[in-house]
Amino acid sequence: MTPLEIATKTLERHIAGNPYPGRGLIIGKSLEDSHWQQVYFIMGRSPNSRNRRFAAEASVLETRPFDESKLEDPSLIIYEAMLECRKAFMVSNGEQTRTLHDGWSNGKSMKEALSQREREPDAPNYTPRITGMLDFSNGSPEIGLSILKANKTNSEYTDRHYFYPSPPSPGIGYGLTTYMGDGNPLPTFVGDPLLFPIGATPEDTLDRYWDALDEDNRISISVKEIAVDGSTSRLVIRNKYV
């Protein structure tokens, strides 16, 4: 199979055929090779996790409560999901987006910035912290992906995995999700970043992934379109609750 065929099969298996991949991020090139795209989606099973929506202010994507009166614990569900700094575009499933942003702005590498973070403390799931960055600061784009997850033998410890793949072919992105599927506890994502398809426009990509995500558990999705030289960006968003 071609890489694009593999990416399409992965979307069918890991997203469309999976009731709960959790939160997910993808960084890739548009099908027409005219832009880069970052995808981020959130899902929810509990009332607190479902009480969310995406909101954007300029280039910043945030999660916000849909109904403030029903918000129980904001610590792991309310955060900045996409930020930009010095021609680097950051996306993550938690407050480590800000950690990476602030570390990067002070000259730290992705590894150095995230070294102070651990897997999420939500026992027994110990949700992984997944992070992605598209960096244009050296001229040519570079991708960095990270997953911080509980050690298999002792969940008190965090295993740190970093990936720096070469730029993908047009129409393909590299992605991570927090879980492999539904369960109790939820099974943590394993393996290398997966190949996923990227559409010609952010609207195409958003529609395709929104339709693929489980209708009961999907909450919000956003796609950021980024110029090939990192000079500009724009966000498109879809929320279940509006």
Image: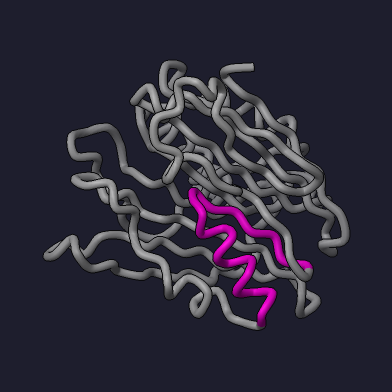
| Rendered view: 204 above or below 187 | above
Report if residue 216 is visible in the image: yes
Residue at the right extreme of this rendering: 231
Report if residue 209 is visible in the image: no
Which residue: 70% across, 48% down? Answer: 37
Q: How is the image coloured?
A: one colour
- In reply to whether residue 91 is colored magenta, the answer given is yes
Query: For this rendering, which residue is in front, 39 or 94?
Result: 94
Which residue: 69% across, 60% down? Answer: 89
Which residue: 25% across, 60% down? Answer: 150
- In reply to whether residue 86 is colored magenta, the answer given is no
Which residue: 81% across, 45% down? Answer: 58
Query: For this rendering, which residue is in front, 108 or 67?
Result: 67
Residue at the bottom extreme of this rendering: 107
Q: Is residue 38 left or right of residue 97?
A: right
Instruction: Write down the region rendered in magenta.
Output: 87-106
Query: For this rendering, which residue is in front, 6 or 207?
Result: 207
Measured as percent of width and height from the top left, residue 149 is found at 31, 60
Q: Is residue 28 left or right of residue 156?
A: right
